[in-house]
Image (spheres, rainbow, N blue to C red):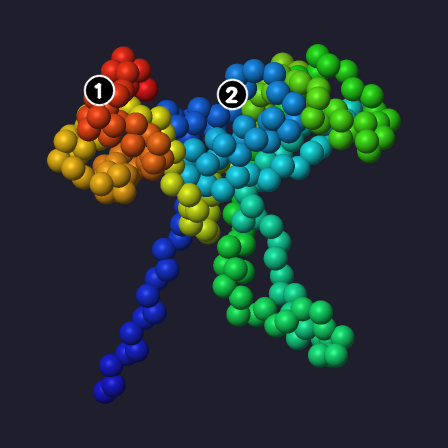
Amino acid sequence: MASAAAAPPTVPVFQCTLRADERSRMFQAGYRFPEKMTYQDLCAFVAKESNKAGFDPLRPRIHNNHRQLDYVTFYCVHKRHHPEQSRLAKGLPESTSKRPDRSEEERRCLYTSCNFEIRVRRSLEVELATDMSTDELKEMKKSTKFDWYMDSPQDQSKESRYIKSSCHCFTHTGHPRRVHPLSDVTPDMRSRIVALAQNNVSVASIQTSILDEFKVMLSDFQVCFKFSCVVFPRFVNVESCLEF
């Protein structure tokens, strides 16, 4: 009797839940942002924190209830709906098609059903007009600063808003990380860099070693500065080296 066909290999499902840690303390309900920021500064800050955690920058979506810019939802770029756009899918004749057949396009795998989403609210201490023109709204986004915070059930109750416990989804699913987590140079990393530099290990190899051991990627500048403290101590301010 013929043997049963081998079962197809199981494709692992990527899933990663972001939690507040030493790389980014932002991913928790109730988090208060460190300073007043404009809308544009907020987007840049959130993008950087997402990179620190190892993912692409998040995409913003503004929500207005009674005022302009009540809160901002940041969602994963892989969540975008990306249906087939080819001529064949649209049923268009070749002579009228402006787009080639993209049914085999590898880029399509970057768009999944990832539901990662966070809600950032602004304090209502600053009153905004409800009838802003497009130009006034653009100017407000880049010039007016607000206090921002991550929404939470406690804030919703205190502000007499609709209580929605699932105001954040901190889990990425269905797509790989695109960047390595970033980090400052910790004392343990510093000791490791010094030990490798004393053995004439290259900068790229030091970065690889740090990535393997500490799961973060240091920049060339971070490694080279520590490297120079050992190789060229006469030309480096030792105190600043130890503080870096």
Q: From what the image shows, is residue 89 above or below residue 60?
A: below
Q: Secondary structure at mark 2?
A: loop
> Which quadrant would the N terminus be assigned to in this image?
bottom left
Question: On the picture, is 100 further left or further right than 136?
Answer: left
Image mark count: 2
Residue at the limit of the structure toward the left, as seen here: 199
Which circle marks residue 234 in the picture? 1
Residue at 46% x, 41% y is 55
Question: On the picture, is 199 further left or further right than 2?
Answer: left
Which circle marks residue 120 in the picture? none
Residue at 76% x, 26% y is 139
Q: Of label 2 and label 1, which has the lower sequence position?
A: 2
Residue at 72% x, 73% y is 97
Disc 2 versus disc 1: nearer the observer: 1
Q: Residue 126's quadrant in the figure? A: top right
Residue 218 can be seen, yes or no: yes
Which amino acid, mark 2?
Tyr
Separation (CA) of disc 2 from disc 1:
44 Å
| Most foreground residue, 75 or 102 | 102
Q: Secondary structure at mark 1?
A: helix
| Most foreground residue, 219 or 101 | 219
> Which quadrant would the C terminus be assigned to in this image?
top left
| Most foreground residue, 195 or 51 | 195
Where in the figure is residue 183, as x and y percent of width and height? 36, 30
Which amino acid, mark 1?
Arg
Where in the figure is residue 217, as x and y percent of width and height? 34, 37
- Per the image, the residue denoted by label 2 is 31
Where in the figure is residue 189, as x and y percent of width and height? 25, 28
Residue at 68% x, 73% y is 87
Where in the figure is residue 70, as x and y percent of width and height? 71, 25
